Image (spheres, rainbow, N blue to C red):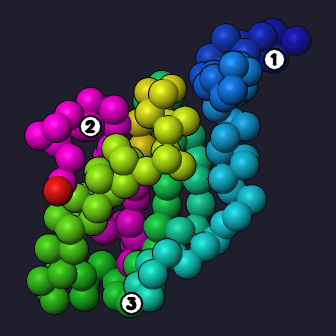
Amino acid sequence: MSSCSQEQETEDFIIIQNEKLPLGYLIDTLSKNLPKTIDKNTRWVSVGRGVEKKSIVYNYLVTSMGKEEFFESGSHMLKEEQTRLLLNYYCTQPSYIILRENNIKLEHNYSGKNNKYIYSIFTENSDCSEEGIAQ
C-alpha cells in the first residue's frame, strides 16, 4: 500500500473544466492517437512523462533522414525553424490552452529514421511573452 500512496504524492495534477485529473490522464489521452504523421518528414510516435515536475515529452521520428544525414546536410537549420514553429504553436493554439493554464512544460525529442536522437526543443509558459513568440 505504501507504494500506492507514494505514487499519489508524486503525481502531478492538471485542472480541466474545474476537474482535477492526474497528468497521466492527459498523457494517456494523447497516446491513443499515436503514431501520427505530422508532415512528409515527421511522425509523432509517443508521449510520456518528463523528468521535471509537470512536464510532458513528445517523441518524434524524422522519417526522411538519419542523425548523420541531418548534420551533414546542413538541415540543422530545421531545428531553428521547428523551435519557432513549436513556440508559436504552444503559445497561440487553442488546443494548447490546457497545457498553458496548467503550466505544463513540453519537451519535443526528435530522432532520425535510424531511431538515433538528434535534438530536443523545449516550450513552456514563460516562453510566451510578446518577445518570445515568433511572428
Image quarter where the N terminus lies is top right
The picture quadrant where one finds residue 83 is bottom left
Residue 120 appears at what percent x and percent y?
Answer: 31, 56
Q: Amino acid at mark 1?
A: Cys
| Eye-nearest disc, 2 or 1 | 2
Tell me if 12 is positioned left or right of 113 in this view: right
Residue pointed to by mark 1:
4
Q: Which secondary structure, mark 3?
A: loop
| Eye-nearest disc, 3 or 1 | 3
Q: Amino acid at mark 2?
A: Cys
The residue drawn where x is 61% and y is 25% is: 14
Q: Which secondary structure, mark 1?
A: helix
Q: Residues within 10 Å of mark 1 (few under 14, many from 20)?
A: few
Residue pointed to by mark 3:
64
Q: Is residue 115 magenta?
A: yes
The residue drawn where x is 24% and y is 37% is: 127
Q: Residues within 10 Å of mark 3 (few under 14, many from 20)?
A: few
Q: Amino acid at mark 3?
A: Ser
Residue pointed to by mark 2:
128
Residue 104 appears at what percent x and percent y?
Answer: 46, 33
Tell me if 66 is positioned left or right of 69 in this view: right
Could you give the CA–CA distance between mark 2 and mark 1, rounded to whole angstroms?
Answer: 36 Å
Residue 103 appears at what percent x and percent y?
Answer: 44, 27
Front one among 51 and 45: 45
